Amino acid sequence: MLTAQQIEQFHKDGCIVVPGELSPETVSSLLQESHKLLSEFSLEGHPMTKFSTGDSLGEGEAKHVGDAYFLESSDKVRFFFEEGAVKDGKLTVPKEKAVNKIGHALHDLNPEFHKMSVTARNREIAASLGLSDPKILQSMLIFKQPEIGGKVPSHQDGTFLYTKPQSAVGFWYALEDCSTQNGTLAFVPGSHKTHPVAKRFVRDGHGGTTFEDVEGLVSGPEPAEENFKVLDIPAGSLVLIHNSVLHKSEANVSQKSRFAYTFHAIDGTCEYDQRNWLQVPTTGGDNFTRL
Ligand code: FE2
């Protein structure tokens, strides 16, 4: 369970840091597993898909192939590159330094990440935040590589992980220390109450994706920079992120990487429809992993 104070703060701010959630041994074995995934990954047959907040880039056929690689990743372990790491279809840095993220079924397919995701502790945390039938939708390893780790603009996770009513909770684990130096998280306290999720990320029906307005909701104004609270997050911490809280992270221009593992839980009692970009299996469905 979270403490009463942590639960209260989560509801008030929309985001909390729970330090010391992973032991140093667990952190180091997950980091080792992450490096192993990066070094064993083969470029053969890869469409050289870059990642920019859910939108795969490219033109014509390249875009189509990139979209398919992304959309069909919900029940696989796939690798997406930093924008700054691919030029004319070729990597500009070694592959271990080129990957922006791995997704989206590590919690299901990778034994190490499965073991630390599907736990009684996480089930209790989800329950204490109000999820009555918690399920894991998707998971990602996010790398923020030294010097080229891209910024993630301000967004709400409910846009990408849409349920009716909104229910997603982000479980975000720092595998390395995160500070202003290497592109840590920042969020707007209380924005989950003032900024309804007015857009959702859906399949466009033509093999790609698009943003769609949510009926009856209007986005709040984009907050000023000074409204973002920048988080100092020691390795091993768990950051819990409300589906509607505005958050972002800056580019990592330092020499130090910023590895994190994240998964999202939703409430299985909420509606999850076929418009969502993420379907498990990819042909359509909501066969999510029970937490
Ligand atoms: Fe996010």
Image: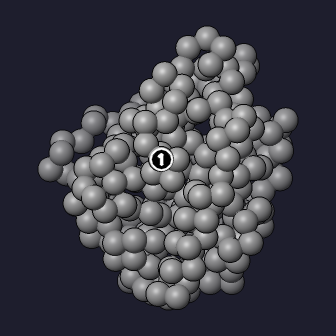
Tell me: 238 left or right of 188: right
Task: Indicate the amino acid at tag 1.
Answer: Pro
Q: Find residue 140 and report its horizontal and vertical position in percent.
A: 58, 56
Q: Find residue 263 and report its horizontal and vertical position in percent.
A: 59, 61
Q: Find residue 280 and report its horizontal and vertical position in percent.
A: 79, 46
Residue 274 appears in the rendering: yes
Determine whether 89 is above or below 125 in the image.
above
Q: How is the image coloured?
A: one colour
**Point 70% across, 52% down: residue:** 77
Tag 1's secondary structure? loop
**Quick one: 38 or 191, which is closer to the camera?**
38
Tell me: 160 left or right of 150: right
Determine whether 258 is above or below 103 in the image.
below
**Quick one: 83 or 70, which is closer to the camera?**
83
Q: Find residue 153 and report its horizontal and vertical position in percent.
A: 35, 40
For the N terminus, the quadrant is: bottom right
For the C terminus, the quadrant is: bottom right
Determine whether 179 is above or below 150 in the image.
below
**Point 71% across, 29% down: residue:** 68
Q: Residues within 10 Å of mark 1 (few under 14, many from 20)?
A: few
**Point 43% across, 86% down: residue:** 20
Residue 172 appears in the rendering: no
Residue lying farthest to the top in this orientation: 60
Q: Which residue is mark 1?
A: 94
Determine whether 3 is above or below 189 in the image.
below
Q: Quadrant of residue 202?
A: top right
Residue lying farthest to the left in this orientation: 226
Tell me: 192 left or right of 69: left
